[in-house]
Amino acid sequence: MKKTLILGASTNSARYSYLVANKLVRKGYPIINVGRKVGEVAGVAIEPAEEIHTDIDTITLYVGPRNQEPYYEYILKTKPKRVIFNPGAENPVLSAKLVEAGIEPVEACTLVMLNTGQY
């Protein structure tokens, strides 16, 4: 199963990152929650963007473009196969950096991908 890192994880049940974490876990996907606030989502603790996970298939991004720059190095060092830019997270600068590093940028909605079997 594709191990997924949720960047911008939130304990707020109204946030899409919260919904995606729970959906991924229900479908059997292993997840890593990364965010600014302490807490737990879908039974997995939210950790700060410090530990580099080298076994990540997908990073699903729930951080707006204005707040992404501090995470560029973290994302690139993680070396996922793809980064999903959910609606509102699209960023041509980061997308170009990903392509240069051999990482596929995807502009899509993770929830829709999961619901339609395209994940």
Image (tube, helix red, strand yellow):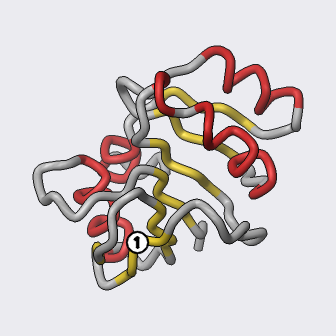
- Residue 83 figure quarter: top right
Give x and y (percent) for residue 33: 45, 67
52 versus 16 height, above or below: below
Q: On the rendered structure, is 25 left or right of 68?
A: left
Q: Residue at x 50, y 77 (%)?
A: 30
Specify few, some or many for label 1: CA neighbours under 10 Å numbering under 14, 14-19, or 20 or more: many
Residue underneath mark 1: 46
Q: On the rendered structure, is 76 left or right of 43?
A: right
Give x and y (percent) for residue 42: 28, 77
Give x and y (percent) for residue 25: 36, 75
Q: Residue at x 75, y 44 (%)?
A: 73
Q: On the rendered structure, is 59 left or right of 104?
A: left
Q: Residue at x 58, y 73 (%)?
A: 1
Judged from the image, the secondary structure of the residue bearing numbered disc 1 is strand
Give x and y (percent) for residue 41: 28, 73
**Image label count:** 1
55 versus 70 height, above or below: below
- Residue 82 figure quarter: top right
Query: Which residue type does callout 1 highlight?
Result: Ile
- Residue 11 figure quarter: bottom left
| Viewer-side residue, 99 vs 53 | 53
80 versus 85 height, above or below: below
